[in-house]
Image (tube, rainbow, N blue to C red):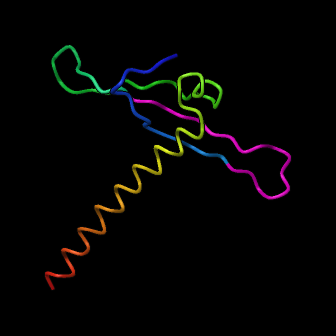
Amino acid sequence: MTFPSNAYVYEFLYRGQPPGSTQAPDYHVIVAVPGTDVFGDPMLSYSQAMTPEQAGAGGLALPTLIAGINTALTAQIATLQAENATLQTAK
């Protein structure tokens, strides 16, 4: 399975396990692809929830997912810090 270039991770759910559990942590991934419907309105198409193996086969192995999440959150933090600095100087 491969994804179009405009696809993005819509949902990443990590299921941890309590200390001492014999079960390994697990996760699933849902990918969204923006597009337009028959009326020309924006819409999203979603993948089914994919197992780690399915996501990895599509190029979304766990290290890739975590790197993407970190990049997005780092950018969001930088934006919020800049907004905060602007608000602080406006006081």
Whether the magenta-drawn stretch holds residue 31 is answered as yes
48 sits to left or right of 18: left
Identified at 59% across, 22% down, the residue is: 57
For residue 57, side relative to residue 46 (left or right): right
Q: Is residue 13 above or below residue 61?
A: below
Quarter location, residue 76: bottom left
- Taking 52 as reference, is 80 left or right? left
Task: Please provide percent x and percent y for residue 72.
Answer: 39, 49
Residue 73: x and y in percent read 41, 54
Q: Which corner quadrant holds the C terminus?
A: bottom left
Q: Residue at x 58, y 41 (%)?
A: 63
Residue 50 image position (x, y, % from top left): 57, 28
In-front residue for pair 39/17:
17
* Image position, residue 49 (x, y; %): 55, 29
Residue at 68 percent across and 40 percent down: it is 26
Please say whether residue 42 is one of the residues in the magenta stretch.
Answer: no
Q: Is residue 88 left or right of residue 9?
A: left
Q: Is residue 60 above or below residue 15?
A: above
Q: Of 13 and 39, which appears nearest the observer?
A: 13
Q: How many numbered tags mark residues here?
A: 0
Residue at x 23% of width, y 68% of height: 83
Give the residues in magenta: 16-32
